[in-house]
Image (tube, rainbow, N blue to C red):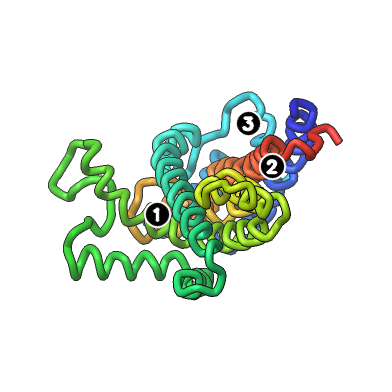
Amino acid sequence: MARMAGRRALFAFPVLGVVTFGVFAVAAASPFDPVKAYAGTAGLTASQENLDQLRANLGVDQPLVARWWDWLTSALQGDFGDSSVMRQPVADVIAERMGWSVLLAATAFLVAILLGTGLGVLAARRPGGWLDRCVSSVAYTLEAAPAFWLGLLAIWFFALKLDVLPAGGLTDAASDVVTFGQVASHLVLPAAVLGISQLPWFFLYVRQGVADALAEDPVRGARARGLSERTVLLGHALRSGMLPMLTLIGSRVPELITGALLVETVFSWPGIAAATVQAATSVDFSLLAALTVLATAAVLLGNLLSDLLYGLADPRVAFDG
């Protein structure tokens, strides 16, 4: 296990380097001017000399490779630079928003795994039954439904029509204090929408895995020994059927990150979505690179977690092979 984690860590460094260089290259080719974005309305009346001086101060007058290398060497020392659009250090921008994004994504992932696993097991007990047909139809429909559309639909129904949940934000509009109760109530809709958008894949994987496990000889033998259906289902079929789902965890991380950005935007959740959009439109090199590193690292960690969980669940898998 340690050797595999070490190999993945060594592999991650060149991947992150290539990804960050790609960010700088795409940003350099963007039609947006970071100097004008930084100057705002003042840039409309500023002289070319002042704009050139501002361009030099921001470092965007340097060649692409020089800008990337300066950022990379500073980042390796823990300095991610200053955000030109947020007017504060990149580390502070991320620290202020990352916790809320992690809370939303973790809650949604938990909802998707628990609900998808539970429904998948129930559907696999009677393949072709009414529950299997109904839930499978809904799952296939949700696969094609964009997360932002689900978010808008949830706001219309629960916030506007029923008026039972807040439409967005972190706290009530009239409150200037962040409390647990307010955060919890405002978290319900975005976490549910993001979790439901990820649910179909977990449901379908578990349903198929458990259904296949129920038809295997070891499970038939457990039933022949007189074990209860609950023991057969949870103690034998579920463990075997969950193995394919474990590999799904890592592959869903990119979709989870993308969905989280959309959901945060729809619900005005104070995560990194707004910072990402502003960094992209303003060509904020430092912030864009740091956010991309975080997203790429999350994907790599998700894949590593999937392999570790699969290896722990199935002793036949060799970690160091």
Amino acid beneath label 1: Glu
SS at mark 1 in the image = helix
User: Which residue is denoted by mark 3 in the rendering?
Assistant: 75
Amino acid beneath label 3: Ala
Please identify the quadrant where the N terminus is shown: top right
In the rendered view, does 242 fall on the left or right side of 65?
Answer: left
SS at mark 3 in the image = helix
Q: Could you tell me how far apart the alpha carbons at marks 3 and 1 are, in whole angstroms?
A: 27 Å
| Disc nearest the viewer among 3 and 1 | 1
In the rendered view, does 8 fall on the left or right side of 271?
Answer: right
> Closer to the camera, 289 or 317?
317
Q: Position of residue 215 (x, y in %)?
A: 67, 60
User: Which residue is denoted by mark 2 in the rendering?
Assistant: 310
User: Which residue is denoted by mark 1 in the rendering?
Assistant: 264
Q: Position of residue 160 (x, y in %)?
A: 20, 67
Dot placed on the residue nearer the N-terminal end, 3 or 2: 3
Residue at position x 18%, y 59% from top? Answer: 164
Residue at position x 22%, y 63% from top? Answer: 159
Residue at position x 41%, y 52% from top? Answer: 274
Q: Is residue 159 among what the camera can see?
A: yes
Q: Which mark is residue 160?
A: none
Near mark 3 (Cα within 10 A), the count class, few <14, some 14-19 or many ≥20, is: some
Q: Could you tell me how far apart the alpha carbons at marks 2 and 1 are, in whole angstroms?
A: 31 Å
Dot placed on the residue nearer the N-terminal end, 2 or 1: 1
